[in-house]
Amino acid sequence: MSTAHVRDEDLGSGESASNVDSHGRKLSLAHRLYTGDVSWDFVGRWKQWFLVSAVVMGIALASLLLRGLNLGIEFEGGVDFSAPAQVNSQTVGTVTDAVKATKLPDMDATQVLTVGEKEVKVQTRTLTNPEVKQVREAVARATGTTIDKVNYSQIGASWGEQITKQSLRALGVFLVLVSLLIWAYFRDWKMSVAALVALMHDLILTLGVYSILGFTVTPASMIGVLTILGYSLYDTVVVFDKVRENVRDLPKQRRTYSEAANHAVNQVLVRSLNTTIIGVLPVAALLFAGTFVIGSGPLKDLGLALFVGMVAGAYSSIFIATPLLALLREREPAMKEHRANLARRAQRRSERPQAPQVSVQAATTGAQAADSTGAPAPTTPTVRTQRTRTTRANRKQN
């Protein structure tokens, strides 16, 4: 990159010649990251990132162990009521107050949500027959309908347990297939290990947020969790693909595996950030609508899982997966030998004597001194003038 024509006074504050191209136009940050003119040390600071992740993971695990998850009716069982109603902004609050007015015990986890504009659903814990009758009467009064139009269905705990087992089984199959896919694509089992660690980080963090905020875990939440695991995997594979490209013929390069991996992270950094921001914006709108507009329902459960998981996935692919991969690869004997060779080359270059160089300022000073004293300057080169030879034809003419 040639920048010799750019004057220092034309450069802005904090701008160097490497910030501009051969035409004097300022280069973008993405271009400078890709070419290596600007580089942040993500891999070298792995201790800081791992410490931050360990603290966050510890908080999430503590909340999961102490508070647990607020499982929905699909997992714990209960009674699902539905009634026709003209839905407005006060419908959810009116029905909730009516159910609480029954004074039945353990009704704090009752959920009231609307389905469209003409139906209300109420989900409660498992109830006895007399308690079911009381809740039906309360819902009928709150919605202005009769008790016979309030339908209900009992959901047993065994069915919820079956759903839980199937969800865990699906998660296990997903992780196994992911590890096999990454190994087959990259031919490197260490990349599979690093990707699985990043996926588990995203999973625990997402579930920990559900536990801390008290959001209900529903089938929509499980769909969101599986979706963000796929997103996190995609982001990690993009980084690993660039790492594989940078470490090709590494013994012939003058950088270590960690330096090549760190360059790969910088090259895809802007792409990862742009992808995450574009994906998070509509998910944030979905979460806002489900939480503050609708108040409850699958939108809120799905939106939270997607929002937390997408942000965690972008973080783990850069700060967890890649540094962990570099640590695993740097332990290999071939990588240790490569680092030793680079160290020996650097030592030989530092011990090599350098020829003295005369600066332009020194040469100019010497020439000025020669003009003032009449003595020839030692740094001024002597120019020899060759005598012009005369041909025989010219001598005859003369």
Image (spheres, rainbow, N blue to C red):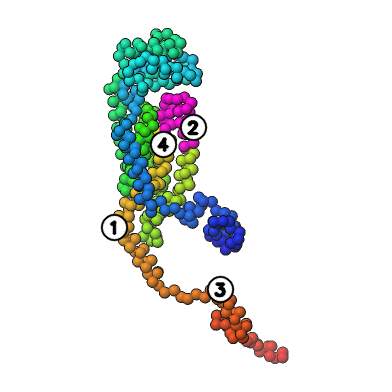
Residue 360, label in figure: 3
Seen at 40% across and 47% down, the residue is 318
Question: Which amino acid type is marked by label 1?
Answer: Pro
**Is disc 2 in contact with disc 1, using a CB cutoff of under 8 Å?**
no
Q: Are marks 1 and 4 in contact (CB under 8 Å)?
A: no
**What mark, if any, has residue 92 been given in the picture?**
none
Specify which label sits upstream in the sequence, 1 or 4: 4
State the SS at label 1: helix
Residue 259 in magenta?
A: no
Range of the magenta residues?
Answer: 280-304
**What residue is at 35 percent from the left and 66 percent from the top?**
344
Residue 55 in view in this figure: yes
Residue type at mark 4 is: Val
**In the structure shown, which secondary structural element does the residue marked by tag 2 occupy?**
helix
Of discs 2 and 1, which sits in the foreground?
2
- Return the mark for residue 308: 4
Q: Which mark is residue 285?
A: 2
Foreground: 376 or 240? 376
